[in-house]
Image (cartoon, rainbow, N blue to C red):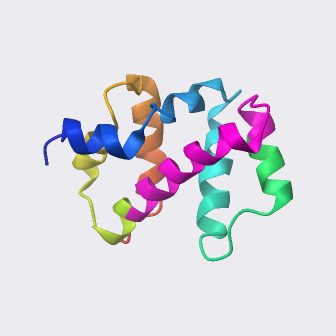
Amino acid sequence: MEREPGATAALWGHAHLPLLACAGSKESVEYILQALWRTRRTGLDAADRTVARDALQLASDAELDPLLVCLRILIRRCVNENVAKDDIPKLFPEEVPPELQKLLTLLLQKFQPE
């Protein structure tokens, strides 16, 4: 699986994933991913949105929503397309720092079918 620069740029828009670096801890990032998974059929409720927004130090839902879309796409791709463990990092745009890629890779593996 190779990175597709044009398709990746269109998908990620203005590189929203690096916003996760603003999270105070890896537990905060894990909470956000777990909340997205838990609410995949219903959408995040106001309480989860507030927790995510506060964890990322964002001022509004308008800043949060594009990031949530990116994360939902990543979760769906990892689960539905059965992306190999070694190919998960290739889903990220190059703007995502390596340490964040490692964290997201570990967390996204939890959602994959065994």
Image position of 44 with respect to 11: above or below: below
Image position of 18 with respect to 45: above or below: above
The magenta region covers 53-76
Q: Name the quadrant of the C terminus.
A: bottom left
| Front in this rendered view, residue 56 or 86 | 56
Image position of 81 with respect to 18: above or below: below
| Front in this rendered view, residue 109 or 74 | 74
Identify the residue at image location x=47%, y=30%: 100
Expressed as whole percent of the image width and height from the top left, the position of residue 95 reads 38, 24
Expressed as whole percent of the image width and height from the top left, the position of residue 59 reads 79, 31
Q: Is residue 59 magenta?
A: yes
Residue, far bottom: 41
| Front in this rendered view, residue 49 or 86 | 49
Identify the residue at image location x=40%, y=41%: 12
Q: Is residue 89 visible?
A: no
Identify the residue at image location x=46%, y=63%: 111
